[in-house]
Amino acid sequence: MRSIPKPTTEEYPAYSHIYMDLMADDGRVLEHMWNNFLTIKALVSELTDAQLLYRYAEGKWTIKEILVHLIDDERIYTYRALRFARHDHTDLPGFDQDQYTSNSFANERSLASILKEYEAVRKATLQLYEHLPEEALTRGGTADGAENYRSVRALIYHLAGHELRHLNIIKEKYLSN
């Protein structure tokens, strides 16, 4: 898979450092994303229905909801990357992740259907990034306000770090008991 250098701090909003800091500075973000998907798939495939539907506190998401949240985020951030890569300078709207999750009905779905969708979205994301022109990686734009500027490569690193953060939360909050 192609190498994509890690973005500089000017290429993403300050709050994104919680995701960026989780990522290696080795340019192998696409490879890491594929491996992270495989890790998550193996981890959750071994869980019982009770574990997949467990909430460690009131108002927290289940593992199934986290997985669909990751899928939703990947679709949205990849769409933003496509728009920015193609020189679209339109300020894109934000989204309410809690609203998305409460309307995803993830808990009514089979784990197999969620993982099938997750894999399809991941493969599409990787294909997009494999074939973007090099100069498109440093193009950028805004979503949810001018203070939320991101470059195309910052979007993929954000996604990868966001996924790692949720993987860590699953291990710490859901599976450590």
Image (cartoon, helix red, strand yellow):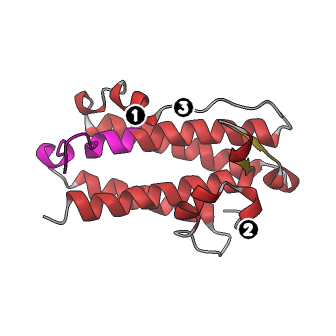
Q: Residues within 10 Å of mark 1 (few under 14, many from 20)?
A: few
Along the viewing direction, whichever of 135 and 151 lies nearer the viewer: 151
Whether 24 is drawn above or below 165: the answer is: below
Q: Position of residue 42 (x, y in %)?
A: 31, 58
Which stretch did the figure color magenta?
48-68
Whole-angstrom CA distance, mark 3 to mark 2, is 27 Å
Name the residue carrying label 2. Answer: 5
Write down the quadrant of residue 169 in the picture.
Answer: bottom left
Is residue 64 inside the magenta stretch?
yes
Kind of residue at disc 1: Asp
Kind of residue at disc 3: Phe
The residue that appears at 23% across and 27% down in the rendered structure is: 108
Along the viewing direction, whichever of 123 and 20 lies nearer the viewer: 20
Going from N to C along the chain, the mark reached first, 2 or 1, is 2
Give the quarter of the figure containing the C terminus: bottom left
Name the residue carrying label 1. Answer: 98
Write down the quadrant of residue 87 in the picture.
Answer: top right
Q: Helix, strand or loop at disc 3?
A: loop
Q: Helix, strand or loop at disc 1?
A: helix
Q: Residues within 10 Å of mark 2 (few under 14, many from 20)?
A: some
Name the residue carrying label 3. Answer: 95
The residue that appears at 75% across and 32% down in the rendered structure is: 91
Whole-angstrom CA distance, mark 1 to mark 3, is 9 Å
The residue that appears at 18% across and 52% down in the rendered structure is: 47
Kind of residue at disc 2: Pro
Along the viewing direction, whichever of 4 and 80 lies nearer the viewer: 80
Q: How many marks?
A: 3
Is residue 100 inside the magenta stretch?
no
Contact? badges 1 and 3 (CB < 8 Å): no
Whether 150 is drawn above or below 8: the answer is: above
